[in-house]
């Protein structure tokens, strides 16, 4: 909005206004001599009555129509009834009223023959004011005809202007009501005021005031005040007289309207302890009408200010915990967001978490917990009062405070805060508080939301027995934050089905035939690097994504098997890894089974790898699952064998057909006799319980040979092949057979 031009009239408005004091009268007469006489008389009347009248004339209907089209503001038209035809005059009247739609112009009919007088109802219908016999229209009569019709015309015009003014206000109100922030609202208000009062000089200024302060910050300006945007209203800007009036207006909380300036006072004190003032100043005195319109408009502006104040207040409420009347976590987040890097570097966030809050809430009731929290808040405020602590509710059970990080965490002070005593019904209650101290600079690259999330997870990762003050370290931050980001990415990757599967062949150590494959999940990041499955699987397990992830992987495995079967037949097995969470879930088995059957594959082509630790950890439960798997035709192998704490008793009962020797023994076979010893033992065990054995992580020919020599039937490892994606695998297989 360019406010400089606001108080300037548009061209047409200006003309209209100037000529409102002058009148135009048109005579339509085909008799030139009567026409002349009429014109002269009208001019004489105008001189006599001191009216400024411009007389226009036309000698026929078409000429009259032309003049009327050129002068929309003619006040009175004298029309001879009989011209080209007997009713030419009446037809002209009809055109004026019904075709052109000019209802303001006053019409006086004239005729030389009384018998041509129009009917009364026609006069009424066409809003013809008077009908005169030319012979009767003396100068004296003409004087009263002109005066009375001009009065009527003026009256009609005023009504019309008032209607337009009301329309203006309606429009203006609509336009300002669309604005919900105070600055654009203020600008719109001044803009609309300029339109309403239509003065070329002067300007407007809108500013706010607050109880108990003298400052009057300017919110928007227009016209002659446009240079004062961003200032405060002072005597220098508005002059001492007006400044005095402004102060009076503030004191009386009312508008003050004079000829050259108007001061409008808007009170939103009941909402936000503020008020708003609009000063409108003009060199030309405001017309009565403009002043009246301004008054009406100010009503709208007043409710607009209230609405915005209300809206702002509601927004503020979003940053407040209403029941405790404390700033909430949104507030804390916004506070941190607003800090610049210097402030971040100097700030410390301390979180005080009340221990066992839920139990206390349950046992002692909400009101009591509220008291605990408020007591904690006031203790914190007292403890750090010289440091201007900014306190907010962090979670239901914790209070956050922002302090300068120079604060020596006076152990004694914190100790006071760590254990608080309350008395309720004469019984002492001890409240233990855990304290987390975090320098915001440690997380300066993170968004404020993430900072708070990290603080929260740092607290929840702490051992519940831990009773010391926890200092958030940058190592801590790195771990959590990268895990955090990775979790978000994983969520997206799963949703986008961006997890793929690689297949690592399992080889018969005697025949060197491929007997099967292990399916291994792969996650490639946008930068091309891979995240290790150890990392993202455990991430998925802790973040509740594992079921979805395993589902996705399993789908990809089945798809790949279908492809492979076409290439090499179906005389091989594909092993897949399951998470312990899957194994103890009720639906997992039937879900897996359904999907295999639905894909048209046989369960005996699939092998479940369950780690030794998984199998033993929740033995009863897992074993039941495994038995069902076996019933359905799946094979089971025990993965990473040798690293878990096997119990012989259980091993014999697990319905697995294969043991996979963990690669940590295999890759030290040549150099480490104890590894050899362990592998030998596993081989004996397998022999006793009739397990097949797969050696994992075979990287050299020597290892393969050594294993073959002691009777290990199968192996898997880089020596034979790395895990490959399905297309690489097909090429690899073809190459082997060639
Ligand atoms: P795992 O089941 O013991 O898988 C064997 C791991 O050894 C794989 O690591 C494989 O790439 C690697 N490996 C194979 N041959 C050699 C070798 O000669 N030398 C060395 N140094 N390593 C070899 P990867 O793919 O990183 O998988 C790590 C673990 O992630 C797996 O260990 C498994 O526990 C888990 N995992 C992989 N895919 C899945 C899955 O789809 N679901 C579940 N729940 N876990 C999976
Ligand atoms: Ca495995
Ligand atoms: Ca393994």
Image (cartoon, grey):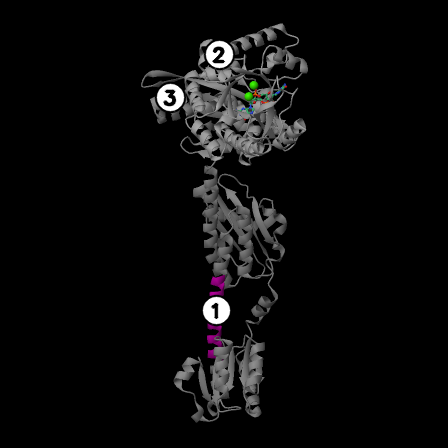
The residue pinned by badge 1 equals: 160
Rendering coords of residue 595 (x, y %) = 47, 33
Q: CA distance from mark 3 to mark 2?
A: 51 Å
Give whichever of discs 1 and 3 has the lower sequence position.
1
In which quadrant will I find the C terminus? top right
Q: Earlier in the sequence, mark 2 or mark 1?
A: 1
Disc 2 residue lies near ligand 3 with CB under 8 A = no
| Residue 689, label in figure | 2
Q: Secondary structure at mark 2?
A: helix
Please tell me which residue is depicted at 56% across the width and 58% down the height of the picture. 194
Q: Nearer the viewer, mark 2 or mark 1?
A: 2
How far is mark 2 from mark 1, CA to CA? 107 Å
Relative to 102, is 35 above or below?
below
Mark 3 residue element: helix
Q: Main secondary structure of the magenta part?
A: helix
Location of residue 68 in the rendering, given as x and y in whole percent from the top left corner: 55, 79
Q: Work out whether residue 413 can be spotted.
A: no
Q: Nearer the viewer, residue 99 or 506?
A: 506
Q: Is residue 344 magenta?
A: no
Quadrant position of ligand 2: top right
Q: Quadrant of residue 488?
A: top right
Query: Which is nearer the N-term, disc 3 or disc 2?
Result: 3
Give the magenta-colored segment's residue range.
146-167
Which is closer to the viewer, label 1 or label 3? 3
x%, y% of residue 526? 63, 33
Q: Nearer the viewer, residue 226 or 363?
A: 363
The magenta stretch spans residue 158: yes
Q: SS class of the residue under badge 1?
A: helix
Q: Is residue 291 above or below residue 341?
A: below
Residue 643 point in image, percent of width and height = 54, 12
């Amino acid at each position: 909005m360019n406010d400089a031009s606001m108080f300037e009239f548009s061209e047409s408005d200006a003309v209209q206004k100037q000529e409102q004091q002058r009148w135009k009268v048109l005579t339509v007469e085909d008799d030139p001599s009567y026409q002349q006489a009429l014109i002269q008389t009208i001019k004489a009347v105008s001189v006599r009555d001191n009216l400024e009248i411009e007389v226009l004339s036309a000698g026929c209907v078409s000429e009259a129509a032309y003049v009327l089209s050129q002068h929309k503001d003619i006040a009175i038209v004298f029309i001879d009834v009989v011209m080209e035809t007997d009713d030419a005059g009446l037809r002209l009247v009809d055109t004026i009223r019904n075709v052109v739609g000019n209802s303001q112009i006053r019409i006086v009919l004239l005729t030389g023959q009384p018998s041509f007088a129009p009917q009364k109802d026609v006069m009424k219908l066409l809003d013809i004011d008077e009908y005169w016999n030319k012979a009767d229209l003396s100068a004296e009569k003409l004087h009263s005809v002109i005066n009375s019709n001009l009065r009527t015309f003026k009256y009609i015009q005023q009504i019309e202007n008032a209607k337009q003014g009301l329309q203006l206000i309606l429009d203006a109100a609509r336009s300002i009501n669309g604005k919900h922030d105070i600055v654009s609202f203020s600008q719109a208000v001044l803009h609309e005021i300029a339109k309403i009062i239509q003065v070329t000089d002067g300007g407007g200024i809108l500013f706010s005031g607050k109880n108990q302060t003298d400052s009057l910050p300017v919110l928007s300006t227009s016209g002659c005040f446009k240079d004062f945007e961003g200032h405060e209203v002072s005597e220098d800007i508005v002059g001492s007289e007006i400044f005095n009036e402004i102060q009076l207006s503030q004191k009386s909380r009312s508008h003050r309207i004079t000829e050259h300036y108007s001061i409008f006072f808007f009170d939103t004190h009941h909402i936000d302890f503020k008020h708003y003032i609009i000063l409108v100043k003009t060199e030309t005195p405001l017309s009565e009408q403009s002043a009246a319109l301004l008054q009406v408009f100010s009503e709208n502006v007043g409710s607009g200010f209230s609405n915005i104040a209300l809206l702002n207040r509601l927004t503020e409420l979003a940053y407040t915990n209403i029941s405790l009347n404390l700033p909430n976590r949104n507030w804390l987040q916004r506070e941190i967001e607003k800090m610049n890097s210097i402030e971040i570097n100097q700030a410390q966030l301390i979180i005080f978490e009340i221990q066992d809050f839920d139990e206390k809430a349950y046992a002692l009731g909400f009101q009591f917990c509220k008291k605990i929290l408020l007591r904690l808040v006031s203790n914190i405020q007292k403890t750090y009062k010289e440091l201007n602590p900014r306190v907010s509710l962090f979670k239901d059970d914790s209070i956050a405070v922002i302090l300068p990080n120079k604060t020596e965490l006076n152990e004694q002070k914190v100790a006071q805060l760590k254990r608080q005593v309350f008395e309720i019904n004469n019984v002492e209650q001890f409240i233990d508080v855990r304290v987390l101290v975090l320098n915001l600079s440690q997380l300066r690259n993170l968004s404020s939301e993430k900072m708070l999330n990290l603080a929260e997870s740092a607290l929840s990762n702490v051992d519940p027995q831990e009773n010391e003050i926890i200092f958030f370290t940058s190592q801590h931050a790195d771990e959590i934050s990268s895990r955090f980001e990775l979790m978000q990415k994983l969520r997206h990757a799963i949703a986008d089905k961006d997890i793929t599967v690689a297949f690592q062949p399992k080889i018969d150590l005697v025949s060197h035939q491929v007997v099967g494959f292990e399916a291994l999940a792969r996650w490639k990041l946008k930068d091309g690097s891979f995240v290790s499955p150890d990392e993202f699987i455990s991430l998925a397990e802790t973040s509740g994504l594992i079921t979805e992830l395993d589902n996705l992987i399993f789908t990809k495995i089945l798809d790949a098997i279908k492809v492979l079967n076409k290439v090499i037949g179906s005389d091989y097995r594909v092993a897949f890894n399951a998470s312990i969470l899957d194994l103890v879930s009720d639906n997992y088995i039937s879900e897996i089974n359904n999907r295999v059957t639905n894909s048209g594959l046989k369960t005996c082509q699939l092998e479940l790898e369950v780690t030794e630790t998984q199998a033993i950890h929740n033995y009863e439960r897992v074993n039941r699952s495994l038995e069902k798997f076996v019933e359905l035709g799946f094979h089971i192998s025990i993965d990473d064998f040798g690293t878990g704490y096997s119990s012989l008793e259980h091993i014999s009962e697990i319905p697995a057909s294969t043991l996979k020797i963990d690669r940590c023994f295999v890759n030290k076979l040549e150099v480490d006799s104890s590894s050899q010893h362990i592998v030998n033992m596993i081989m004996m065990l397998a022999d006793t319980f009739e397990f097949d054995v797969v050696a994992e992580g075979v990287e050299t020919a020597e290892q393969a040979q050594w294993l073959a020599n002691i009777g290990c039937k199968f192996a898997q490892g880089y020596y034979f092949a790395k895990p490959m994606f399905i297309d690489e695998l097909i090429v690899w297989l073809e190459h082997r057979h060639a």
